[in-house]
Image (cartoon, grey):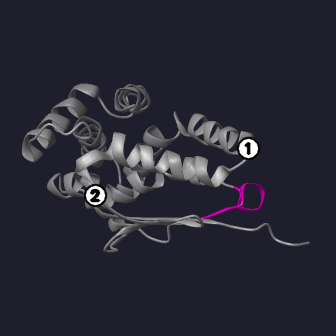
Amino acid sequence: MNEQLISLFRAHIEPSAPLDEVDAAAARIAAAVGGSSPHLPLTALVAGAYQVLLRRLPRSEALSLVAQAFHEPIRPYVHDGTRAALDASDDPFSVITGYSKDREENYFGSDFSFTRVEDASQYLVDVHRCFYVQVLAVAGVPELGPVFCEFDAAWISAIDRDRHHVDFQRPTTIAHGAPTCPFHFRRATPNSP
Protein backbone atom coordinates (compact mmCIF):
# COMPACT_ATOMS: atom_id res chain seq x y z
CA MET A 1 0.00 0.00 0.00
CA ASN A 2 2.82 2.44 0.79
CA GLU A 3 4.17 2.18 -2.76
CA GLN A 4 0.77 3.21 -4.14
CA LEU A 5 0.50 6.07 -1.67
CA ILE A 6 4.00 7.24 -2.61
CA SER A 7 3.17 7.18 -6.31
CA LEU A 8 -0.10 9.05 -5.88
CA PHE A 9 1.44 11.60 -3.51
CA ARG A 10 4.33 12.31 -5.89
CA ALA A 11 1.94 12.85 -8.81
CA HIS A 12 -0.20 15.26 -6.80
CA ILE A 13 2.61 17.25 -5.18
CA GLU A 14 4.75 17.64 -8.32
CA PRO A 15 2.95 20.75 -9.66
CA SER A 16 3.72 22.54 -6.38
CA ALA A 17 7.13 21.19 -5.38
CA PRO A 18 10.00 20.06 -7.65
CA LEU A 19 10.41 16.32 -7.15
CA ASP A 20 14.21 16.47 -7.19
CA GLU A 21 14.11 18.81 -4.18
CA VAL A 22 11.44 16.68 -2.49
CA ASP A 23 13.48 13.52 -3.02
CA ALA A 24 16.63 15.17 -1.67
CA ALA A 25 14.79 16.36 1.44
CA ALA A 26 13.20 12.91 1.92
CA ALA A 27 16.62 11.24 1.63
CA ARG A 28 18.05 13.54 4.32
CA ILE A 29 15.15 12.76 6.64
CA ALA A 30 15.41 9.00 6.02
CA ALA A 31 19.17 9.11 6.73
CA ALA A 32 18.60 11.05 9.96
CA VAL A 33 15.97 8.55 11.15
CA GLY A 34 17.82 5.46 9.95
CA GLY A 35 16.56 1.92 9.97
CA SER A 36 14.52 0.00 7.46
CA SER A 37 10.94 0.66 8.48
CA PRO A 38 8.48 0.10 5.63
CA HIS A 39 6.80 3.35 6.76
CA LEU A 40 9.95 5.47 6.45
CA PRO A 41 9.92 6.16 2.68
CA LEU A 42 6.35 7.49 2.71
CA THR A 43 6.73 9.48 5.93
CA ALA A 44 10.04 11.00 4.81
CA LEU A 45 8.55 11.86 1.40
CA VAL A 46 5.57 13.69 2.88
CA ALA A 47 7.81 15.52 5.37
CA GLY A 48 10.33 16.35 2.64
CA ALA A 49 7.62 17.78 0.39
CA TYR A 50 6.39 19.90 3.27
CA GLN A 51 9.92 21.21 3.93
CA VAL A 52 10.28 22.14 0.25
CA LEU A 53 6.92 23.89 0.23
CA LEU A 54 7.77 25.83 3.40
CA ARG A 55 10.60 27.50 1.48
CA ARG A 56 8.05 28.82 -1.02
CA LEU A 57 4.76 29.25 0.79
CA PRO A 58 3.26 30.27 4.12
CA ARG A 59 2.92 27.40 6.56
CA SER A 60 -0.89 27.14 6.25
CA GLU A 61 -0.68 26.84 2.46
CA ALA A 62 2.11 24.27 2.66
CA LEU A 63 0.12 22.20 5.15
CA SER A 64 -2.97 22.39 2.97
CA LEU A 65 -1.14 21.31 -0.19
CA VAL A 66 0.55 18.39 1.54
CA ALA A 67 -2.73 17.28 3.13
CA GLN A 68 -4.52 17.39 -0.22
CA ALA A 69 -1.77 15.43 -1.97
CA PHE A 70 -1.73 12.84 0.82
CA HIS A 71 -5.49 12.42 1.33
CA GLU A 72 -7.43 13.21 -1.79
CA PRO A 73 -6.11 10.63 -4.29
CA ILE A 74 -7.02 7.65 -2.10
CA ARG A 75 -9.85 8.95 0.10
CA PRO A 76 -12.78 7.93 -2.16
CA TYR A 77 -11.47 4.38 -2.55
CA VAL A 78 -10.87 3.88 1.16
CA HIS A 79 -14.20 5.42 2.13
CA ASP A 80 -16.26 3.64 -0.52
CA GLY A 81 -14.55 0.29 0.00
CA THR A 82 -15.06 0.46 3.75
CA ARG A 83 -18.68 1.57 3.40
CA ALA A 84 -19.41 -1.24 0.91
CA ALA A 85 -17.87 -3.87 3.19
CA LEU A 86 -19.84 -2.63 6.19
CA ASP A 87 -23.08 -2.41 4.20
CA ALA A 88 -22.67 -5.94 2.85
CA SER A 89 -22.01 -7.53 6.22
CA ASP A 90 -24.43 -9.05 8.69
CA ASP A 91 -21.98 -7.97 11.41
CA PRO A 92 -20.28 -4.66 10.50
CA PHE A 93 -18.68 -4.50 13.96
CA SER A 94 -16.72 -7.69 13.25
CA VAL A 95 -15.74 -6.38 9.81
CA ILE A 96 -14.38 -3.04 11.00
CA THR A 97 -12.60 -4.48 14.03
CA GLY A 98 -11.19 -7.23 11.81
CA TYR A 99 -9.79 -4.54 9.50
CA SER A 100 -8.28 -2.79 12.51
CA LYS A 101 -6.65 -5.96 13.83
CA ASP A 102 -5.24 -6.81 10.41
CA ARG A 103 -3.76 -3.34 9.92
CA GLU A 104 -2.29 -3.32 13.44
CA GLU A 105 -0.51 -6.60 12.82
CA ASN A 106 0.25 -6.61 9.11
CA TYR A 107 0.56 -2.95 8.18
CA PHE A 108 1.65 -0.96 11.21
CA GLY A 109 3.69 -3.72 12.83
CA SER A 110 6.46 -3.05 15.32
CA ASP A 111 6.84 0.62 14.33
CA PHE A 112 3.79 1.30 16.48
CA SER A 113 2.83 -0.07 19.89
CA PHE A 114 -0.72 -0.93 20.89
CA THR A 115 -2.69 -2.03 23.90
CA ARG A 116 -6.05 -3.69 23.41
CA VAL A 117 -9.17 -4.46 25.41
CA GLU A 118 -11.64 -6.70 23.67
CA ASP A 119 -14.86 -8.50 24.40
CA ALA A 120 -18.06 -9.23 22.47
CA SER A 121 -19.27 -5.63 22.67
CA GLN A 122 -16.10 -3.57 22.31
CA TYR A 123 -12.65 -3.40 20.79
CA LEU A 124 -10.57 -0.66 22.39
CA VAL A 125 -7.16 -0.04 20.87
CA ASP A 126 -4.75 2.57 22.15
CA VAL A 127 -1.63 3.47 20.19
CA HIS A 128 1.23 4.29 22.57
CA ARG A 129 4.02 4.81 20.05
CA CYS A 130 3.51 6.38 16.63
CA PHE A 131 6.28 6.05 14.07
CA TYR A 132 4.94 8.98 12.06
CA VAL A 133 5.21 11.34 15.04
CA GLN A 134 8.76 10.13 15.71
CA VAL A 135 9.90 10.75 12.12
CA LEU A 136 8.24 14.14 11.93
CA ALA A 137 9.98 15.20 15.15
CA VAL A 138 13.37 14.20 13.70
CA ALA A 139 12.49 16.12 10.52
CA GLY A 140 11.65 19.21 12.59
CA VAL A 141 8.05 19.34 11.34
CA PRO A 142 5.90 17.97 14.19
CA GLU A 143 3.02 20.18 13.06
CA LEU A 144 2.60 17.79 10.13
CA GLY A 145 1.45 14.99 12.48
CA PRO A 146 -2.28 15.79 12.28
CA VAL A 147 -2.09 15.38 8.49
CA PHE A 148 -1.20 11.73 9.09
CA CYS A 149 -4.01 11.41 11.67
CA GLU A 150 -6.51 12.88 9.22
CA PHE A 151 -5.77 10.08 6.74
CA ASP A 152 -7.98 7.88 8.93
CA ALA A 153 -10.98 10.12 8.25
CA ALA A 154 -11.60 8.26 5.00
CA TRP A 155 -12.49 4.99 6.70
CA ILE A 156 -13.85 6.58 9.88
CA SER A 157 -16.40 8.58 7.87
CA ALA A 158 -17.65 5.36 6.27
CA ILE A 159 -19.03 4.17 9.61
CA ASP A 160 -22.67 5.10 10.07
CA ARG A 161 -23.60 4.44 13.70
CA ASP A 162 -27.30 3.81 13.09
CA ARG A 163 -26.82 1.84 9.91
CA HIS A 164 -23.85 -0.29 10.99
CA HIS A 165 -24.51 -0.48 14.74
CA VAL A 166 -20.93 0.58 15.42
CA ASP A 167 -19.89 3.49 17.60
CA PHE A 168 -16.36 4.67 16.87
CA GLN A 169 -14.46 7.24 18.90
CA ARG A 170 -11.01 8.71 18.46
CA PRO A 171 -11.19 11.94 20.40
CA THR A 172 -7.51 12.81 20.14
CA THR A 173 -4.10 11.56 18.98
CA ILE A 174 -0.45 11.64 19.98
CA ALA A 175 0.16 14.17 17.19
CA HIS A 176 -2.36 16.46 18.88
CA GLY A 177 -0.45 16.20 22.18
CA ALA A 178 -2.26 13.30 23.84
CA PRO A 179 -0.38 10.39 25.45
CA THR A 180 -2.14 7.87 23.18
CA CYS A 181 -4.28 7.58 20.07
CA PRO A 182 -7.49 5.82 21.14
CA PHE A 183 -9.30 3.86 18.46
CA HIS A 184 -12.41 2.70 20.31
CA PHE A 185 -15.04 0.56 18.64
CA ARG A 186 -18.23 -0.41 20.45
CA ARG A 187 -21.34 -2.22 19.35
CA ALA A 188 -24.24 0.23 19.27
CA THR A 189 -27.97 0.00 19.01
CA PRO A 190 -29.68 2.24 16.49
CA ASN A 191 -31.35 5.40 17.74
CA SER A 192 -35.05 5.00 18.27
CA PRO A 193 -37.36 7.30 16.31
The image quadrant of residue 107 is top left
Residue 46 on the magenta span: no
User: Compared to 184, does 68 lie above or below?
Assistant: above
**Would residue 103 be visible to someone looking at this image?**
yes
- State which region is magenta: 160-167
Q: Residue at x 32, y 33 (%)?
A: 17
Please indicate whether residue 180 sits to the left or right of residue 98 in the image.
left
Give the camera-side residue of 127 and 174: 127
Circle 2 sits on which residue? 130
| Image location (x, y in percent) of residue 94 | 59, 51
Identify residue type, mark 1.
Asp
Secondary structure, mark 1, is helix
Q: CA separation, marks 1 and 2?
A: 31 Å
| Image location (x, y in percent) of residue 71 | 49, 42
Identify residue type, mark 2.
Cys
Residue 162 on the magenta span: yes
Considering only order in the chain, which callout, 2 or 1, is on the residue closer to the N terminus?
Answer: 1
Give the camera-side residue of 30 and 165: 165
**Mark 2 closeness class: few <14, some 14–19, many ≥20 residues within 10 Å:** many
Give the camera-side residue of 111 and 90: 90
Single out the residue that lies furthest toward the front: 120
Circle 1 sits on which residue? 87
